[in-house]
Each structure stands twice: as C-alpha cells, then as structure tokens.
Image: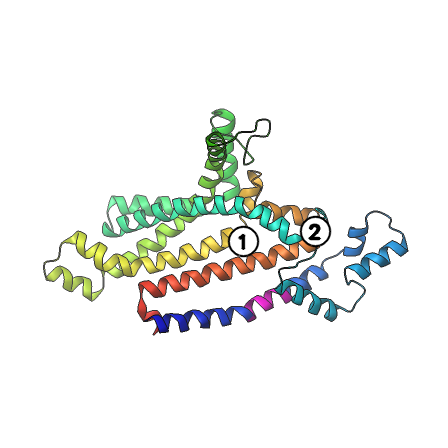
Amino acid sequence: MLGSLLKFSLGRIVLSIPLLLSVIVITFLLIHAAPGDPAVLLAGDAPAPEFLAQIRYAYNLDKPVWQQLLIYIIKAAQLDFGSSIYFKRPVIDVIVERLPATLLLSGTAMVLASVLGVALGAWAAQRKGSGTDSIVSGASLLGYSIPTFWLGQLLVLLFAVYLPLLPASGMTEVRLRYTGFAHFVDVARHLILPACTLAVFELALIARFTRTAMIDALGRDYIVVAFAKGGRKRHVVWRHAFPNAVIVSITIIGLEFGALLAGAVVTETVFSWPGIGRLFYDAVFRRDFTLLSGLFIFASLAVILVNLVTDILCSLLDPRIVR
C-alpha cells in the first residue's frame, strides 16, 4: 500500500511539472501581449531616452522575446519573479506578505462550508424526497445562485450600516491598535462578514455534491445487503455509505480551496481584505505587469499543490485509486 501510494504521488508530481511550465509560458506571453510598455511604466512619466535604455537593459527588455522567456523561466524556478513596479519590492516578498490574510479568510470559509455542507448533504440524502430534503436542496440552489459581490454588499448594509454590529471592511481597526487577545477579537470581528460571504457559495456547492454522492452510495448493493442482514441504520450509513460518498466531497473541497487560495478577488475587494485576491485587483488596476505575472504563477502553484494533497488524501480513503 505504501509503495503504491508513493508511486502514485511521484506520478502526480511529475505530471505537475510540465503543467506549471505551461502556465509560466502562457502567463509570460499574455502579459507581454497586453498594451503598454513595461519599461515606460518602470521609468515613470516622460523618461529620458538614456534612462529608458537603462531600464530596458536592467530588466532584459532589450532582448528578443524568446530570450526574455528563457530568463524568466529560470528565475521563476527560483521563485524570483522580479520587482513590483508599484511596490518597488521583490514580487515574492509582496505575495508572501499578503498570503497569511488569504489563508485566514479562505481557511475559515472552507472549514465552515465543509463541516456544514457535508453534514447538510448527508442529512438530506438520508431523507430523500422529504420536506427536509427539499428545504436543503432549495437552500443550496439559492446559495449557489447568489452573486458573491451582491451578497457581500448586502451583508455590509445589514450588519455594518443598518445594524452597526460588525466592521464593514479591512482586517483590523485603522484608528486603534490592539495587542494580545484584543487583537485576536478585532481580527475575528473583521473576519465574520467576508468569511460568511465566501462560505455561502462553497457550502451550497459541497452540500449538493455530498447529497448526490450519498444518495448514490445508499443505493449500492452492499448497502442493501447490510440492511438485509439487520444492520442498524446509523451504523450502515456512517460506517459503509459515508466513507465512499465523502471522497466526492473531499475532491470538491480540494478544488474549491485551491481556487480560494488563488485569490478570492471579489470578496477581498468588496471587504478591502488585504489578501492575494485584493492584490490581484490592485495589480491589474495599476498595470503592475511583474506582480501580475508572479501572482498568476503563484496561484497556479497553489492550485496544483492543493489538488496533489487532495489526490493523496482520496487515495488514502480509497486504496483502489492507486491500484
């Protein structure tokens, strides 16, 4: 079992290398195809020709595109994405600085959505066709259909404007500086609205997939046999049906968590949350080409790593995957 799992994991890692390389190449070509001269943006307004030439030389912009691409691939392999045009700092430093905020927001939202989504989906599947199942299915469809930006603004109006119970934006208070437990409470209060906004869509998605997978598992022959042998319903459902159905849920959770790590752009922009998603928006708005390309590659790497972990976890739950 361990040997098969190791071989499976190494195979996934090997397949990830050309995928990541393709992402780097496509990102480089798309960024360079965008209108605007990066050298002019780096040099500022009305630069002197001599200074503009120095900028092109320093950033390898005076070389042919294929040489620029080769240099960029070599540096990207070393996590060197150049310096941000706006922040005047290495791109990797800017990304790492914003990463904890995105991990906190995405992790909180996914834990909330995963626990409630799996529980509601499994609960509805056991009562297929009942009023409970209809309510859960209808609520899931509604949560799946609501636009995130609209829901975020609605929560801000309700809980930050009409009922001033929670802060509307940011990660901490701007005018006050808390330390210790007070700082923890301050961050938690700012986290509630964006985390709930982000969790609604994920919860609905996970609940719908879990319900479908549980209904399929409960209709299998081995479940019918288990009930025919006199097995208790709770034991059969949670011991036999749920472990097989939850693999689908874990797969969806992994895919969605990777996407959230790549940047919850809309949610972080609505709530001014200082994470990767907000950084994406700022990079596009400021035409920061080096930061934008670094963010694209980092987002792709995050998705690949999370999917790799998801595949390994699913193979541990179901050894047939690695056979």
Check if residue 157 falls in the magenta segment. Answer: no
Q: Position of residue 282 (x, y in %)?
A: 65, 46
Q: Is residue 37 visible?
A: no
Q: How many marks?
A: 2
Q: Amino acid at mark 2?
A: Ser
Question: In which quadrant of the rendered view does residue 212 lie?
Answer: bottom left
Stretch in magenta: 18-25
Mark 1 or 2, closer to the camera: 2
Which color scheme does this rendered protein use?
A: rainbow
Q: Main secondary structure of the magenta part?
A: helix
Element on which disc 2 rests: loop
**Side of 266 relative to 68 (left or right):** left
Dot 1 surroundings within 10 Å: few (below 14), some, or many (20 or more)?
A: many
Identity of the residue drawn at 45% across and 61% down = 307
Check if residue 20 falls in the magenta segment. Answer: yes
**Nearer-the-camera pick, 320 or 219:** 320
Dot 2 surroundings within 10 Å: few (below 14), some, or many (20 or more)?
A: many
- The span from disc 1 to disc 2 (Cα, nearest Å) is 19 Å
Instruction: Report the residue marked by disc 2.
Output: 84
Q: Is residue 34 visible?
A: yes
Q: Amino acid at mark 1?
A: Ala
Identity of the residue drawn at 43% across and 57% down = 254
Label number found at residue 262? 1
